[in-house]
Image: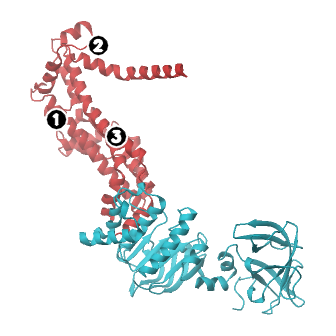
Chain colours: A cyan, B red
Amino acid sequence: MATITLDQVRKVYGGVVEAVKGVSVDIADGEFIVLVGPSGCGKSTLLRMIAGLEDITTGEIKIGDRVVNNVDPADRDIAMVFQNYALYPHMSVYNNLAYGLKNRGMAKDEIDRRVKEAARILEIGDYLDRKPRALSGGQRQRVAMGRAIVREPAAFLFDEPLSNLDAKLRVQMRVEIKRLQRSLGTTSVYVTHDQLEAMTLADRLIVLNGGNIEQIGAPIDVYDKPASTFVAGFIGSPAMNLLPVKAVDGGLGLETGSGLSVPNLHGQDKCLLGVRPEHLEVVDQLPNGPHAQVTVNVLEPVGAESYLYASFENGGPEIVIRVSSHAVHKPGEKLFLGIKPENLHFFESQSGKRIGD
Amino acid sequence: MKRLQLSDHLVLIGGVIFMVAPVMIAIMTSTHDAITIYKSGLQFLPGGQMLENYETVLFRAGGFTKEVNGLVMMKNSLILGLGFAIGKIVISMLAAYAIVYFRFPMATLCFWVIFCTLLLPLEVRILPSYEIVQSLGMTNTYSGLIVPLIASATGTFFFRQFFMSVPDELLEAARIDGAGPWKFFFDILVPLSKTMIAAIFIIMFVYGWNQYLWPTLITTDEALFTLVRGIKQIMQVWVGAQIPALNEAMALAILAMLPPVIVVVIFQSWFIKGLVESDK
């Protein structure tokens, strides 16, 4: 168990492509950190740099008190779980778990003890003699995790470990990973592009975009107060509605026309207004407070709830509204929407940065 | 439908006869005495001379120096075939390992240079090769027979393609598990390549076993003669003013065919197993 410290870590490929642009973060002992972002944002590169599979161009990575920039992956005291499991196909499950320990010159009975213990925790004891190809996807995933656990490392590194599983298994394994990490208390860094996985697993989220950190924080803080339009659009599903607005009489209105009225809380001439789908409430009458007036385009039921896609009278972006699953709305129907002032987010038009707190 | 099946079988049976008949004729002919064959040509039915003929070619010392018999030649052929196949596999696996897994300057160029040697068969470079072997004093030795031939562009190419299809994550997992380059090679790559090795072993063993030109050039000592050369030798030396010993030549040809057949039969089952069970 250890802390992980990244100090101005950069990765440049071939002197041209800057995949990671100066990332600094302190990861506490036992913390579960999730690196999240779209593909190509540098999250996997960053994880692989922590693992030692990629060289660090500049900056410093510390695991515990030790600078590991030039330390071999095997000597970093980390364990990694890969997206495609990367199990050794010709070895039995037992040998897959034991291989790293054997290479370390560990005593046979200690290896045996650790493998049996990991097998017990992960409930894979029944197929220790099988080859990986005789296992299902979920079982392979467990073996891959077992290979990490037997090492008893200072940190677990997960590289999109659930992407190859079907939806149901993914949810199940997600819960399991969280439970396991809690009980082992091992510092973990987890890479995913799935914002739901990120939200549910993380103690703290790191949202990456184009090699830069957009925001670091507890999932709920990131959700409640996205630091930029990028985070606002990435975290939360369906994504936050972002509307270009300008100052009008008595507040802010749509740039493209009427249909929206919100208070100008920060005295902006022009900015982007953000509202989450669940914070738009369908009401009977035009309310006094912040409100919008839209026409329904499509109703999309997903079971527990439904999403309304609606547009403003004079154009502008289509917005999404979360409604109860039993709400009945026809396309073409006109709706009044109420919004609470505390649920409004404001972002600078140019930089996309959050205005206010 | 029935008729179609019947014609299918006829086509298959025809194919089998076409492939097997020459071998059967050789076997049958090898069981007669030389006079019968000389008088009435190739034989289609078994004769009574089988044991005698095979005993003669296996154990009777023949040739110019009367030092070499069929067994010795078979041993020589085996050494050549095995040395050839194993040497080629070892060398080409290591070459492919270097090309795929290590970053060194002009790796791609190196590969293509190796690949281009495919265009230069032994016959094209046989004089310089002979010159080198001769100046190293390696004529009439097993190493002279084997070593100059074990560089294999074909093998390197096949292993390169195979290694490139092994997922990178396997290497990374092994690195995290503390496996260095040699450990990764022996613990992971070699076991994964089993089927590939079996396939190349089949091809190379048969290729080495059937070498004729190179052994003829390098070995003048009859004690180093291979079976393939021995067949020729029987025809030359034992003919004289007498009747050609066609029966013995046939027997030796059948014996020369056996080891490659055995190798193919043994390794084929591995080969097919490897194709059916996807391991990666």
Left or right of B16 on screen, residue A247: right
At label 3, the amino acid type is Ser
Label 3 to label 2: alpha-carbon separation: 32 Å
Residue B46 x/y as whole percent: 24, 14
Judge whether A274 appears above or below A250 on screen. Answer: above
**The quarter of the displayed image where residue A294 is located:** bottom right
Seen at 41% across and 79% down, the residue is: A184
Badge 3 marks a residue whose secondary structure is helix
Is residue B178 visible to us here? no
Mark 1 belongs to chain? B
Residue depth check, mark 1 versus mark 2: number of the one nearer the observer: 2
Q: Mark 1 points at which residue?
A: B224
Q: Nearer the viewer, residue B175 or A288?
A: A288
User: Residue flagged by tag 1: what amino acid is it?
Assistant: Leu
Disc 3: host chain: B
Mark closest to the chain's N terminus, 1 or 2: 2
| CA separation in Å, label 1 and label 3 | 32 Å
